[in-house]
Amino acid sequence: MSNVISEDIERVLFTEEQIETRCKELAAQIEADYDDRGITPIVVGLLKGSVPFMAELIKYFRHPIEIDFMSVSSYAGTTSVGDVKINKDTDLSAKGKHVLIVEDIVDTGRTLAEVRKLFINKGAADVKIVSLLDKPDRRVVDIQADYNGFTVPNEFVVGYGLDYNQCYRNLPYIGVLKPEIYE
């Protein structure tokens, strides 16, 4: 890893401007769906990767929402280990509520499938998922986000919350990490 993290990026997939535009579109779509039903959702960000995306997304909501966070893990380095661990649960009760899970990327699908099941078991009235990125080529669990920002190829992407060993989250764009960094 170099001292300037942008030097470790092979190419930019989505610019800050593209992400902002897509967040506006997603927010409008989500709000229209919830407004049609008169619902105030609990927006639950999955720490840490969802934070930049969630912050950008909720700026464009015009109606009330509740916000909470969960910390879950299923990765060791670059590999999904398949064992989803809840490190921090939500503070708000999901019983009878409409939950919107905010995720940075749907990769294998294991984490989201477990988190979705957890909210259903807690008595949530409804569980929807919004993800900034979708990587369908890596899916091992049959789950799809209800709202998806961008589809990405099966490459190692970082930036805008996505990391490699806790680095690169602060890049204002989504980029492909040079293979020599993680191999």
Image (cartoon, rainbow, N blue to C red):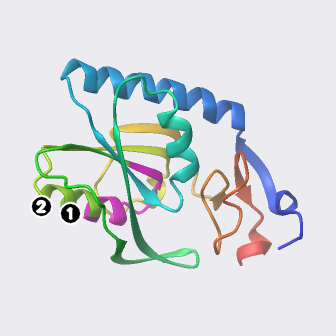
Q: Residue at x 71, y 62 (%)?
A: 168
With 82 as the anchor, is 118 left or right in this view?
A: left
Residue 58: where, in percent of width, then height? Answer: 47, 35
Give the position of the C terminus as an image quadrant.
bottom right
Give the position of the N terminus as an image quadrant.
bottom right
Q: Residue at x 22, y 18 (%)?
A: 36
Q: In the displayed structure, would residue 1 be above or below residue 135?
A: below
Q: Are marks 2 and 1 in contact (CB under 8 Å)?
A: yes
Q: In the displayed structure, would residue 130 be above or below residue 50?
A: above
Q: Residue at x 44, y 38 (%)?
A: 148
Local packing at callout 1 (Cα closer than 10 Å; few below 14, some 14-19, many 20+) is some
Residue 153, which numbered label?
none
Q: CA distance from mark 2 to mark 1?
A: 5 Å
Residue 20: where, in percent of width, then height? Answer: 62, 31
User: Which residue is label 2 attached to?
Assistant: 121
Residue 151 in view: no
Residue 144: where, in percent of width, then height? Answer: 33, 47
**Residue 86 occupies which quadrant of the picture?**
bottom left
Mark 1: secondary structure: helix
- Magenta-colored span: 102-114
Residue type marked 1: Leu
Q: Is residue 8 magenta?
A: no
Q: Nearer the viewer, residue 61 or 172?
A: 61
Residue type marked 2: Asn
Q: Nearer the viewer, residue 169 or 78?
A: 169
Residue 118, which numbered label?
1
Residue 111: where, in percent of width, then height? Answer: 35, 65
